[in-house]
Amino acid sequence: MKKTLNIAGKLLDLSVPQVMGILNITPDSFYEGSRFGQAAHAVARAAQMQTEGATFLDIGGHSTRPGAGGVSETQELDRVLPVVEAINQQLPHLVISIDTFRANVARQAVAAGAHIINDISGGNLDSTMFETVANLGVPYVLMHSRGTPQTMQQLTDYAHLVSDVIRELQEKIARLRALGVKDVLIDPGFGFAKTATQNFELLQQLEAFHALDCPLLVGVSRKSMIWRTLGITADQALNGTTVLNTVALSKGAQILRVHDVRQAAEAIELLQKLVA
């Protein structure tokens, strides 16, 4: 399984798992603690996450939780570009990921200083995304999903969940490779066109995704598979998140995408003691 990423000409080692902190520049992300508006506040939060152990920062200006409403491209750009520029200037050691399904937003964010494109739609919502990624020459997080945030929860029928998800990802990896994209990261897409039961099945069989020979990113932080199962709220789901992150790490996750950086970094540090 590939264990390096080319970030602006420098190789980033993923042999030890890394943390990606979530910074939502939105008023409606499902977890209130991840929402930050003004650039100065966002930079302060980014600096805190870097201190707590984040290597990556994932900046998003369009909520993609199930059922989320639409945001115009102009509004998304207005939200994310000032933050990307400010963090790139003030925190140059952070690797910035732009969380968008729009090729033009990705293009402008990379021009502003983003290093990675994280596309929750896996290219489904913008037919020019793959060509854009190839032209930009940056790593791409290919997440498995179906439909849109409004329709995804009606698209959970699979003949064989894990093999179907892997096959759908394989087809897109082949398209990306044909275009010359070298660094593809895989996100199985927990909560996206998956039921709670399917989410746990994906996690239980996470090792199967190593067959794709791409770095593996896992994002289960404070998701409903945790809080609905436990009968709590997203605000109360930190402990459950740490439990599932630990399981993901034990099954080969190389990047944890999280709201709570310090706790994820601690889980990594402790697990590394078991394999040292």
Image: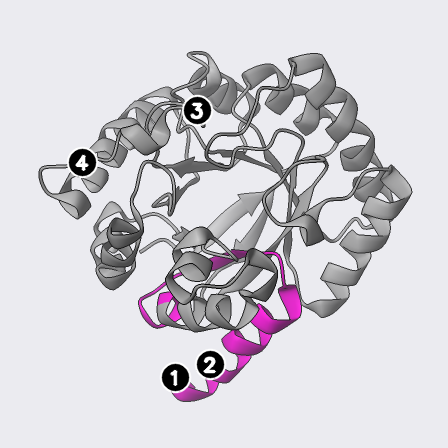
Ranked by sequence position, the earlier of labels 3 and 4 is: 3
Q: Which mark is residue 150?
A: 3
Image quadrant where residue 100 sits: top right
Q: Is residue 143 above or below residue 110?
A: below
Q: Residues within 10 Å of mark 2 (few under 14, many from 20)?
A: some
x and y percentages locating residue 152 in the rendered image: 35, 29
How far is mark 2 from mark 1, CA to CA? 5 Å
Select label 1 or label 4 by which is in front. Answer: 4
Q: Residues within 10 Å of mark 3 (few under 14, many from 20)?
A: some
Question: Residue placed at 29% from the left, 29% from the top?
Answer: 154
Question: Against 3, is 129 above or below?
Answer: above
In the image, what residue occupies the spot 46% across and 60% down? 227
Q: CA distance from mark 3 to mark 2?
A: 39 Å
- Tell me the amino acid under the disc marked 3: Gln
Q: Give percent across and percent down for residue 263.
A: 60, 72
Is 193 on the left-hand or right-hand side of 219? left
Q: Nearer the viewer, residue 34 or 224?
A: 224
Please give left or right for residue 184 compared with residue 114 in the image: left
Residue 149 or 41: which is nearer the viewer? 149
Checking the image for residue 272, the label placed there is 2
Callout 3 touching callout 1 (CB < 8 Å): no
- Residues rendered magenta in the picture: 248-276
Residue 249 on the magenta segment? yes
Q: Residues within 10 Å of mark 1 (few under 14, many from 20)?
A: few
Residue 10 position, x and y percent, is 60, 48
Q: Which residue is mark 1?
A: 275
Instruction: From the image, tell me which residue sits under label 4.
Output: 167
State the residue at coordinates (9%, 37%).
159
Q: Amino acid at mark 1?
A: Val
Q: Is residue 254 visible?
A: no
Q: Is residue 233 left or right of residue 83?
A: left
